[in-house]
Image: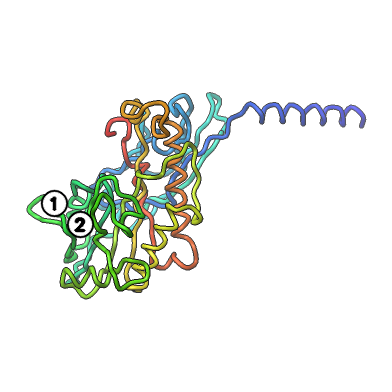
Amino acid sequence: QKKVKEYEAQIKLLEEKIGAVRPEINVNLADEYTLVVGDNFQLFYRSIVQAPDPYGYYIKLEGKKGHAYNRYYEFKPESADAGMTYDLKVSVCDANGVEYGSDTTKLVVLAEKVKTNNEKVVLCFGDSLTYNGVWVAQGISKFVKAGNTKVKTIGSMSKSIGGTTSYYEGNSGWQWSSYITGASGKDSPFFSKNSTSGISFKEYAQKYNVQKIDEMYILLTWNGIGGKFREFSFTDALFSNAKKIIDQFHKDFPSGKVTLIGIPKPSMNAGLGAYYELNLGYADNYAQSVTVMNYNQFMEDWTKMEDYKSFLSYIDGMGQFDSEYNM
């Protein structure tokens, strides 16, 4: 019995030492991803693994569908996958398969398109990532193709793709607060002198001769997130302003749906370092990438809150973005 106790103490000490040197690595996947038959879906390891060099580890993928490549996971659903949901687990391990961190998600493949004659009024807005309108026009084009839905977009800016013109709001350098108070000498497109919050989506809709806004998609914001390894809450100005916007929209259109789109991470290939001096917060590529992961996680957690989960949803634009070769 004495020897057993001695060995137990030694084992405990060894476990503590191993735990001290074994890294804890976060894998950040959205709860689910929506896939479309015929569209190629990818998740990039650099964008979902919180590590300076994810390629220095064994990245283990577990699931029933898709392929594992050295930089990303890939799955192109076929007709037989329509309406199906598949589990996927991504783990970061050492060379012997010992797990350092993992996350799971569900890949939800949309059912075959359903024809409808109902028209949806859609509002999209954001910052410089929205300014050229590409994601809006491309997204609306796929939106219509997937559901045969009539879509009417509204906004002061426009972009045409495939013969279809989409309207939206996109302002470089803007953040959540800008869409309340305006910025750079320009009023918010939602400005209202009659609303206590300073904005009104009802008045904005009337300006474009529509009775309501059915869906709103928002891609915000790299501007103002700042800070290395920053964490977020509703007490800081960033999300307190975001909350004002979402609350006002829900007040104006209680049946309307809002989708928050996760922002992409910066490139580890000196994406930010090439533009910012060392004394500026944005100059640190990795620290900012962790801030982005924390920002997106807070947005997804927000959509699960009791007062918001019925109308607020999250799309992960981070894991699907090849930041190494795109920014």
Report the disc number at residue 168: 2
Q: Amino acid at mark 1?
A: Lys
Q: Is residue 311 left or right of residue 201?
A: right
Label 2 neighbourhood size at 10 Å, few (<14), some (14-19), many (20+)?
many
Indicate the secondary structure of the residue bearing disc 1.
strand
Q: Nearer the viewer, residue 308 or 203?
A: 203
Q: CA distance from mark 2 to mark 1?
A: 8 Å
Label 1 neighbourhood size at 10 Å, few (<14), some (14-19), many (20+)?
some
Q: Say above or below: 140 vs 22.
A: below
Q: Measuring from the top left, give residue 116's x and y in whole percent.
A: 19, 70
Q: Say above or below: 78 vs 26.
A: below
Q: Counting residues from the N terminus, which is met first, the one under dot 2 or under dot 1?
A: 1
The extreme front residue here reads: 185
Indicate the secondary structure of the residue bearing disc 2.
strand
Q: Is residue 92 left or right of residue 319?
A: right
Q: Measuring from the top left, give residue 42's x and y in whole percent.
A: 32, 40
Tag 1 residue: 159
The extreme right residue here reads: 2
**Rendered residue at 19%/67% (across/down):** 115
Tag 2 near tag 1, CB within 8 Å: yes
Q: Nearer the viewer, residue 94 or 321?
A: 321
**Rendered residue at 54%/29% (across/down):** 97
Q: Measuring from the top left, give residue 157's x and y in whole percent.
A: 16, 55
Q: In the picture, residue 249 is in which quadrant?
A: bottom left
